[in-house]
Image (cartoon, rainbow, N blue to C red):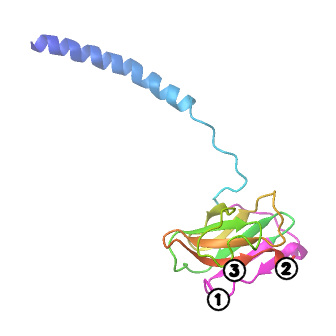
Amino acid sequence: MIRALRRRHRRVTLALAVCLPIALVTALASRPAEPLDDNAFADRSEPDRPASDRNTLDLGSSPGPNVSSTLWASERIVELTTRAAIDHPDVLVYWIPSAGSGAGSAALPADARLLGPLGGVGTRRFRLPPDGQLAGSRLILFSLGHGTRVTTIPLGERL
């Protein structure tokens, strides 16, 4: 009885020794490529830009004096700088193409596009979608944990 179990165990072990590496290599080779998104969630170092292209945006007092923002209109990049932690959990940055979409509502409008998370202290850069106009568009800082807007930042009024 023991001899039969040992033979079976040896055969199964040899089969796994051959099949598992082949299965691993096949799985790694069949993975889809990483998406090439201009709106990567990681910070990037950006080249110096002319001061005439810089628009500092007023956030009001909603998230407090700990957040400032800058719009680089020619490159469609928004920089949000946090100097201290925001008092809302899981803050995400959304872009909406027009001021009328979902105005006054605590929920996100249907045409809101996710740009990325705003976490930690430091500067985060977000590339705005190329297909929309900046005039009349807005950024929404949305707390995923609370399910409400933290603040809305108008982009197009100062262009």
Between 74 and 100, the one lying in front of the other is 100
Q: Where the N terminus falls, by quadrant?
A: top left
- Give the labeled residue for mark 2: 158
- Give the labeled residue for mark 1: 61
Q: Where the C terminus falls, by quadrant?
A: bottom right
Q: Nearer the viewer, mark 3 or mark 2?
A: 2
Q: CA distance from mark 1 to mark 3?
A: 11 Å
Q: CA distance from mark 3 to mark 2?
A: 15 Å
In percent of the image, x 64 and y 87: which residue is there?
A: 65
Q: Quadrant of residue 31?
A: top right
| Location of residue 86 in the rendering, given as x and y in whole percent from the top left corner | 55, 79
Disc 1 crowd, CA 10 A, few/some/many (<14, 14-19, 20+): few
* Residue 57 sits above or below residue 10 on the image: below
Circle on res. 146: none
Relative to 119, 5 lies left or right: left
- Give the labeled residue for mark 3: 68
In percent of the image, x 63 and y 62: which residue is there?
A: 116
